[in-house]
Amino acid sequence: MAGDVTLDAATLSGSDAVRGRHCMSGDVRIHYLDFNSEATGVPVLLLPGITSPAATWAFVARRLAATRRVVVPDIRGRGLSENRAGLGYTLDDYSDDALAVISAAGLGRPNLIGHSMGARIAAHLEAREPGTCSRLILADPPLSGPGRDPYPTPLQSYTNARDAACRGASIEEFRKLTPGWSDAHIASRLQWLPTCAVEAIVATHRNFQEEDIFPSFPRILCPTLLIYAAKARVVPPEAAAQVVALMPHARAEAIDTGHMIPWEDLEGFLQAIERFLA
């Protein structure tokens, strides 16, 4: 079951040829943005992070969609996807949703790109369902888990940012939380952060500590690129080497930014992706 939702292009920072659609994942309604849906070739499924609804990734998707179809879901509990009490927020729950989008959108075996939480989902999905994707790009996945170093960003950083957006913080006020971002990126974040359910943020952050992503890596057999942010400590260089060593067809590439890589170096991020997909 799938349907269309008409979206204002201005909301998507000038995106063209994009439709808002939805599908069902079990009894959970998932919304996704579909860029350049008529394009041929291997499409891209892009999975965002913990407080990044699909619209905040439109500036990346629009560039990737110049030559291919790109689909970006609102992860459950965020954006225009379903948000109600009692939803599950485990890697299995998120992976089920990604599979539902792949099926509903007719993506076949897409190239799968995940950032932060989305990278954990992507790795878990391909390990759980081998052959789901053609190529896999993991951008700065949190490597925390039982017995491992904690995720470096505290939960309060996310909830404080959401609270600021909900009370109508100005661009200049919010810039203190995201120095170096453009006004357009901050405005998009302020618009969409209130759609991120507190329950989804809290449960996901807790699962960064309680769910171990490392057992997934040896089961990933497709060509894989690990992109990590050199100025963050989400994936330290030594950990990047450890992760790549666990996968038979993987390599790592550092980009000299903080964790929100494309917000700080869009061209470097896109160039790394295009080199790999080519």
Image (tube, rainbow, N blue to C red):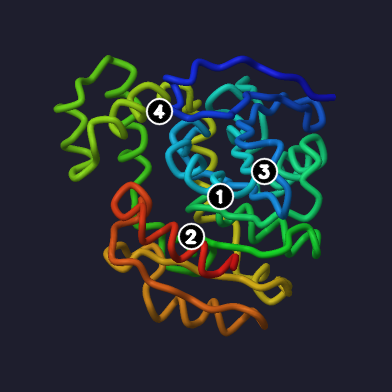
Rendered image quadrant of residue 272: bottom left
Q: Secondary structure at mark 4?
A: loop
Q: Amino acid at mark 3?
A: Tyr
Rendered image quadrant of residue 172: top left
Give the label, 4 or 1, closer to the camera: 4
**Which residue is depicted at the point 58% across and 32% down?**
74
Q: Which residue is mark 4?
A: 13
- Quarter of the image with the C terminus in it: bottom right
Which residue is at the front of the view, 101 or 27?
101
The alpha-carbon separation of the residues under discs 1 and 3 comes to: 9 Å
Q: Secondary structure at mark 2?
A: strand
The percent position of residue 223, horizontal first and vertical second, equals 66, 73
Vertical placement of residue 274 versus 88, above or below: below
Which residue is at the front of the view, 216 or 270?
270
Q: Which residue is mark 2?
A: 139
Q: Which residue is mark 1?
A: 118
